[in-house]
Image: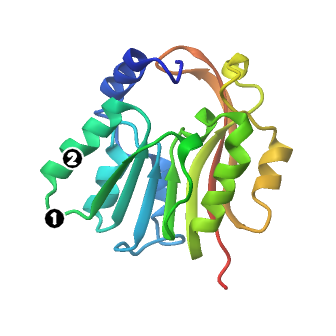
Amino acid sequence: MKSNNENGWEAFYTASQTRPASPLLRLALGEQCLPMGNGHAVDLGCGSGIETAMLSGAGWSVLAIDKEARAIERIEALKAELPAADLTVWASSFEELESLPPSSLIHAGLSLPFCHPAHFSVLWGMVRSALASGGVFAGHLFGDRHDWTTHSGMIFHSRREVEALCEGLDIELLRESEGEGGLVPHHWHRFDLILRKPEA
């Protein structure tokens, strides 16, 4: 699916709206990582809003970010459904972001690969800088054997490159997997990451 295809994104949101929240995020919120809510969280590339809703419902103050108009509409609707939630929405591409607020949790579910390669190092630097001491990043990167590597506006990483991105952070999980499947059938190659910023 192309990142600039609005109909494609809407089909993705519709197809995924009944799925449970990300297992990776739920793992990051477990006892060994972040058992307590009520901190500040960022949902980078919030998409259908399922993870944003879960975080808001768990007591987190959430900043949801996405460039797609339909994603923003979904989060605005969620705000109306959860009037007591501390939920902020930014309509922005990754390339347009200038900074991220200090956060105990940053979640990027299948979204970082859609950052333009020329800007990825800036975005990753923002993520690392925004993490509070002891804060956790949970997200995915696409590997260099992914079928979509022909998309020049997306970024893919080798395992060595992923390990380099993790330097200076405590690795709670670095899981590499690949296979066949997806809403649009393809060969996928993915890294699941849960990283903690060391206590100061």
Q: Is residue 62 left or right of residue 118?
A: left
| Dot label at residue 33 | none
Q: Examine the rendering and report whether any part of residue 174 can be seen.
A: no
Instruction: Give the left or right position of residue 85, taking residue 146 as reference.
Output: left
Residue 103 position, x and y percent, is 49, 69
What colour scheme was applied to this rendering of the protein? Answer: rainbow
Q: Residue at x 29, y 51 (%)?
A: 53
Quadrant where the C terminus is found in the figure = bottom right
> Most extreme residue toward the bottom, as rendered?
200
> 191 or 161, which lies in front?
161
Residue type (three-letter) at the residue carrying disc 1: Ala
The correct choice, above or below, for 157 with respect to 3 in the image is: below
Three-letter residue code for mark 2: Leu
The x and y percentages for residue 169 are 72, 67
The residue under label 2 is: 78
Q: Is there a contact, CB below 8 Å, between mark 2 and mark 1?
A: no
Neighbor class of circle 2 (other Cα within 10 Å; few <14, some 14-19, many 20+) is some
The relative height of residue 183 versus residue 195 in the rendered view (above or below) is above
Among the two numbered marks 2 and 1 on one chain, the one whose residue lies closer to the N terminus? 2
